[in-house]
Image (cartoon, rainbow, N blue to C red):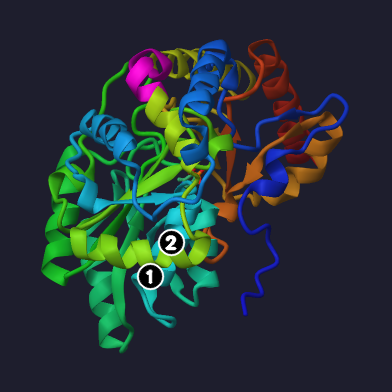
Amino acid sequence: MWTDTRPAVEMPRLFERGGDLISFAGGLPDLDVLPLDVISAQLSRLLRLGGKLALQYTTPHVAGALVPAITDLMAREGGRTTAENLVPTGGSQMGLMAVALGLAAPGETVLCQTPAYPGAAAAFRTAGLHPHAVPEDAEGLDPEGLRETVRRLRADGRTTRLLYCNPTFQNPTGATLSVARRGELLTVARELDLLVVEDNPYGLLGFDGRTTDTLQGLDPDRVIYLGTFSKVFAPGLRSGWIAAPAELASTLRRTTEIMALSPSALAQATLAAFHTRSGWTDLIDAYRASYRERSALMADALDAELGADGPWSWQRPDGGFYIWLRHRDGVDTNTFADAAAEHGVSFVPGSHFGIGGENADALRLCFSHVPKKRIAEGISRLAAALGQRAAE
Ligand code: PMP
């Protein structure tokens, strides 16, 4: 039984509202960019012409009409896949749970890049697995540290086969693993016979439109790729996919069938219609532009309010949803939570992204959905909350 009392994922924080609160907590996309009139016309046509199929149960396969959308999206980051490799999910959170239940046995250790998306560790623990942090250096996930960690764990009699990572515009740091590091990581994975679980919701959201080849594209036989429509379309459809070597994909199809019988036929049909009639390029560009602007507003406000020489360090992100602040003297950011609430601002404390409480000296700010005119005000409130605490 999982007894961790922290929020399982981020959900409690996603919907926090109230009065004048400016929330930098939940990682919500900016749905103002969605062409709702276009989608609504496509949906109404879809229901008129194919409603009975779109509203029926379906098989645990990606709908044929949706396969080209997925191969198109993955190819934009060098990914390679075909229908036999694909498993539909209700988003990457379900993908994580399916991998945890279908491809590992209770008691196994799962290696995790940290800081990590809390929903990953929660899924692994719920399936009876033990998340274990992999060392990082200045360039991120450290392949040499990975090798050492696996050797040590195996020498201790632990079984470990899965490595979880979120290598592009990582939640929560915004960092991207270099191409050279990706190659080294895969070399170590081959040497130690690890399967790499690549969680990639943000890869297409680089502010300048540049992408980095996915681990999946570099080694499709060793990578279980978690894709999602949550950040390149909308999370409300609860639709995503796993791309995995064919044999693992059929195991995962059995697992997802047990979890949910079938994916949403309506969601898949909606996405397939959008791919055929509109394509993703304009929508992804619109998302990128929104996040580029918001991240610049937040980073400028942080420069102005916290300065470069103060106790906080951070990097300007190149993509994704987040800015990660770290306290140079290691102060636990949970201690700022009350002050933040008093000042009407919120963030997620870094300890939520640790496997065993580490990263408590950091905090995550999300800019993706905050109204532009509220960002500077929110950062000024945050600075007051952090400053108030520091002055005590
Ligand atoms: N993985 C990461 C790294 C995430 O940031 C998120 C969403 N915040 C998810 C998985 C889950 O996303 P979804 O289930 O909506 O695809």
Dominant secondary structure of the residues highlighted in magenta in the image? helix
Q: Position of residue 305 (x, y in %)?
A: 64, 20
Circle 2 packing at 10 Å, graded few (<14), some (14-19), many (20+), is many
Q: Does the magenta-highlighted stretch encompass residue 239?
A: no
Residue at point 21%, 52% (across, down): 84
Look at label 2 and name its amino acid: Thr
Residue marked by disc 2: 256
| 309 and 267: which is toward the camera | 267
Q: Let me know if residue 300 appears in the view.
A: no
233 to the left or right of 217: right
In the displayed structure image, the side of residue 256 where residue 134 appears, left or right: left
Secondary structure at badge 2 equals helix
Residue 206 placement (x, y as % from top left): 36, 24
- Confirm whether the magenta stretch covers residue 281: yes
Left or right of 331? Residue 209 is: left
Q: Are marks 1 and 2 in contact (CB under 8 Å)?
A: yes
Residue 99 to residue 309: above or below: below
> What separation in Å lies between label 1 and label 2 (alpha carbons)?
9 Å
Q: Quadrant of residue 79?
A: top left
Q: Quadrant of the C terminus?
A: top right
Q: Residue at x 36, y 58 (%)?
A: 164
| Viewer-proximal residue among 293 and 105 | 105
Q: Judge from the rendering whether residue 230 lies leftward or rightward of residue 145; answer left or right.
A: right
Q: Nearer the viewer, mark 1 or mark 2?
A: 2
Give the labeled residue for mark 1. Answer: 102
Q: Earlier in the sequence, mark 1 or mark 2?
A: 1
Q: Amino acid at mark 1?
A: Gly
Chain part drawn in magenta: 274-284
Q: Position of residue 157 (x, y in %)?
A: 31, 89
Residue 332 higher or lower than 55, as above or below? below
Residue that appears at 47% across and 62% down: 97
